[in-house]
Image (cartoon, helix red, strand yellow):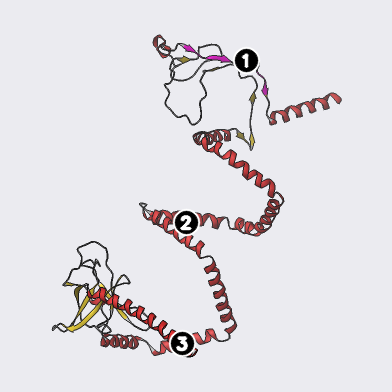
């Protein structure tokens, strides 16, 4: 035996092993179906369906059509074999679908839920009329009806209009096609970002759907925002015109201070826990700060703020409370025995200091607070406002001119 014959023998052996392996695979699949249970399906027309057509469950192969026989009532009875262990709900509908571009068909089961009871041997698989193949005469009749409904003159007009619109625009159409290709490439590159936007959009839509009046509320907000933007059109145009230069300057600033910015960001890691632990204090400060700003606005008169700073406030009364850790939120019994003793320029407000018969308000007050600070000055120093300083300066200059004259 020469070398050429030996090579042919080895090649034949390899092909035989591969063919036997595929044969065993298909025989095993048929064996699985042969050990399955039988069900039937009734259809008016079984065109394209017959022995060997696969049965799938949501696209997964679970059986095969073994026979297609007339049922005696003008229809067709399909006899199916389903692989053992397949749980198909008894009310699950099946439909005829096309599995490949060549027009191969299969019977696909698409249940609404996976709840039982399930099909057993001898059961009937439901195939609704709208899910069955349309009869050929019906298709031809529908096509004829659609064609008769078309107006030839209208079709001619559409053709002429399209011809006039496309005439002389070959370069533009080519540019549109090229731009579409570029846009498709950009969208493909940004697919993860777009997918995230869609997912977040679905979350927002679900949140709106759970509200009592989602559409009306969102529409009202959108209308208000759109109206505000329309009224600020000049400002928006100015911002769009100036933003590139501003962003460029900001970029130069960040580039020049890259190391300093890195250090600043690193320091925020130390400061952030301090702010985080004082969340309640920030909340209270922001709440009271609004009231303070509202009161501060009341000092503005004629476009100027009227401030007066009293340098000698007088004494105050304090309680010896112990400072505890900010994280310590445990309950403590309040000390109701503390009080500020009445004294000149040290009157206290509040319910406990309110006049009551027999001094009942301070009946249990046995621990006086501590008085700190200087006594109230008879003539307190008041820092004048800018307006008063300007008036005093004008008066002084007027006096100097009068003395000089």
Q: Nearer the viewer, mark 2 or mark 1?
A: 1
- Give how far across and how far down residue 222 sits, in percent: 47, 56
State which quadrant residue 148 falls in.
Answer: bottom left
Task: Determine the image quadrant of residue 238.
Answer: bottom right
Residue 334 appears at what percent x and percent y? 43, 21
- Secondary structure mostly seen in the magenta stretch: loop
Quadrant in the picture for the C terminus: top right
Q: Report the magenta residues as a range.
A: 367-382
- Dot 3 lies on which element? helix
Residue placed under numbered mark 1 in the picture: 374
The quarter holding residue 381 reads top right
186 shown above or below 153 = above
Residue 374 is one of the magenta-drawn residues: yes
Residue, disc 2: 222
Q: Residue at x 55, y 86 (%)?
A: 167
- Please tell me which residue is depicted at 50% across the width and 54% down the height of the picture: 225
- The answer to whether residue 24 is left or right of residue 379 is left
Question: Which residue extends farthest top?
Answer: 358
| Residue to which mark 3 is pinned | 6
The answer to whether the residues at label 2 and label 1 have Cβ atoms under 8 Å apart is no
How many angstroms separate mark 2 from mark 1 (CA)? 59 Å
Which mark sits nearer the N-terminus, 2 or 3? Answer: 3
Residue 227 x, y percent position in the rendering? 51, 56
SS state under label 2: helix
Q: Is residue 334 visible?
A: yes
Crowding around mark 1 (Cα neighbors within 10 Å: few <14, some 14 to 19, many 20+) is few
Query: In the displayed structure, does residue 265 sit left or right of residue 43?
Result: right
Task: Tell me: residue 58, above or below residue 104.
Answer: above
- Nearer to me, 402 or 309: 309
Query: Could you tell me if residue 127 is visible in this image?
Result: no
């Amino acid at each position: 035996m020469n070398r050429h014959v030996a090579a042919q023998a080895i090649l034949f052996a390899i092909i035989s092993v591969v063919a036997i392996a595929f044969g065993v695979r298909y025989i095993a699949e048929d064996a699985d179906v042969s050990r399955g249970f039988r069900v039937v399906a009734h259809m008016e027309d079984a065109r394209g369906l017959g022995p060997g057509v696969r049965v799938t469950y949501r696209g997964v192969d679970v059986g095969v059509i073994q026979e297609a026989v007339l049922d005696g009532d003008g229809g067709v009875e399909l006899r199916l074999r389903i692989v053992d262990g397949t749980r198909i709900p008894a009310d699950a509908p099946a439909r005829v679908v096309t599995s490949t571009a060549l027009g191969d068909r299969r019977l696909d089961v698409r249940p609404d839920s996976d709840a039982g009871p399930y099909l057993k041997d001898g059961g009937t698989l439901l195939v609704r009329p709208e899910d069955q193949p349309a009869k050929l005469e019906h298709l031809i009749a529908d096509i004829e009806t659609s064609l008769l409904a078309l107006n030839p003159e209208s079709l001619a007009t559409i053709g002429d209009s399209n011809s006039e619109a496309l005439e002389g625009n070959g370069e533009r159409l080519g540019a549109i096609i090229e731009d579409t290709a570029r846009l498709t490439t950009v969208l493909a590159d940004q697919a993860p970002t777009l997918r995230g936007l869609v997912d977040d959009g679905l979350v927002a839509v679900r949140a709106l759907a759970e509200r009592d009046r989602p559409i009306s509320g969102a529409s009202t907000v959108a209308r208000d925002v759109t109206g505000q933007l329309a009224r600020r059109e000049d400002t928006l145009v100015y911002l769009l015109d100036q933003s590139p230069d501003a962003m460029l300057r900001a970029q130069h600033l960040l580039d020049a201070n890259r190391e300093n910015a890195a250090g600043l960001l690193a320091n925020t890691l130390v400061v952030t826990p301090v702010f985080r632990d004082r969340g309640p204090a920030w909340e209270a400060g922001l709440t009271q700060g609004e009231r303070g700003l509202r009161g501060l606005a009341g000092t503005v008169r004629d476009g100027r703020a009227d401030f007066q700073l009293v340098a000698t406030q007088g004494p105050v009364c304090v309680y010896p409370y112990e400072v505890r850790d900010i994280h310590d939120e445990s309950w403590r019994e309040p000390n109701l025995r503390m009080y500020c003793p009445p004294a000149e320029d040290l009157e206290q407000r509040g319910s406990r200091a309110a006049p009551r018969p027999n001094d009942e308000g301070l009946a249990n007050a046995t621990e006086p607070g501590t008085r700190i600070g200087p006594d109230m000055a008879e003539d307190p120093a008041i820092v004048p406002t800018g307006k008063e300083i300007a008036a005093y300066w004008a008066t002084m200059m007027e006096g100097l001119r009068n003395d000089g004259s």
